[in-house]
Amino acid sequence: MSLTDLQNMQPKMNHLLGLRKIDIEDIKENDHNIFEQRDIDELKENIKKDGLLKPLEVYQNGDHYILIGGHRRYNALLQLYMDDLIEPEINCIVYPKPDCENNELIQIIASNAQRNMSKAELVEITRILLKVLESEPDRKPKGMETRVWIGGYLGVCGKTAQEYINLARGKKKASKKERDTSFEYVETLLREKYSTKVKVTKNRLTLIYNGVDDLNRILEIMNCIEK
């Protein structure tokens, strides 16, 4: 069975699913797509072996079609077509044209929900969703936390979504400052002198004692009380 035959399998199923064959030269990539186009060569080999298992997702815009989902598949198919390994007609699902940019962005994100995403992609998706909410707050159901709403698109829990929200907003976890080594040196001296736990920080000196007798012992060493 040829690669073209594999692409043309199950015409009855295609009809039931509402699939349409579209010339690949009439399909354009979406300028709003933010997903990385990686492992194209591997995908080409898979398509050569098994055919196009999942149709491209597009909408019509004048005399051509714009991708919503399947940019990696499109690029793999385009290379195969340029190498004369497949026919130009590609199985596509045609959706209505989005009526606004936010709907188009949401549709692209939803279409790619099943793919393995890099951390950079997840942060960028979060940034896009935050902008969508900023312009259209009513997209999020009343009473639902922003992190829960975004987590639904990312496929993660609210706590994890909050981490991506912080990154998207440029917030980072506060890193612990390196402790002044002079404090450690003073602590060592006092610990040896008073045989007790000592903590030295900026503007504060703390000595830990165990009971009244231990306190009196320390005070005697300090010459604060008479023996």
Image: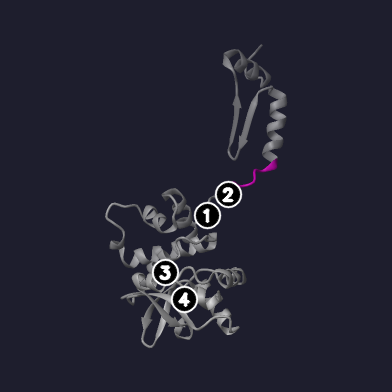
Please provide percent x and percent y for residue 153: 41, 59
Which color scheme does this rendered protein use? one colour
Which amino acid lies under the numbered mark 2 shown in the image of this protein? Ser
**Hey, which residue is sitting farthest bottom in the picture?**
63
Q: Distance between the residues labelled 4 and 1?
A: 51 Å
Q: Mark 2 points at which residue?
A: 175
Dot 4 or dot 2: first in sequence order is 4
Q: Distance between the residues labelled 1 and 3?
A: 28 Å
The residue segment tinted magenta is 175-181
Q: How far apart are marks 4 and 2 (CA)?
A: 57 Å
Which amino acid lies under the numbered mark 3 shown in the image of this protein? Ile
Magenta-colored stretch includes residue 3: no
Where the N terminus falls, by quadrant? bottom right
Which amino acid lies under the numbered mark 4 shown in the image of this protein? Asn
Is residue 103 in sight in this rendering? no
**Hey, which residue is sitting farthest front in the picture?**
1
Q: Residue at x 50, y 71 (%)?
A: 52
Determine whether the residue tagged by mark 3 lies in a helix, strand or loop: helix
Disc ID at residue 172: 1
Q: Mark 4 points at which residue?
A: 8
Within-10-Å neighbours for mark 1: few <14, some 14–19, many 20+: few
Q: Mark 3 points at which residue?
A: 108
Which amino acid lies under the numbered mark 1 shown in the image of this protein? Lys
Is residue 78 in sight in this rendering? yes
Within-10-Å neighbours for mark 3: few <14, some 14–19, many 20+: many
Q: Nearer the viewer, residue 71 or 132?
A: 71
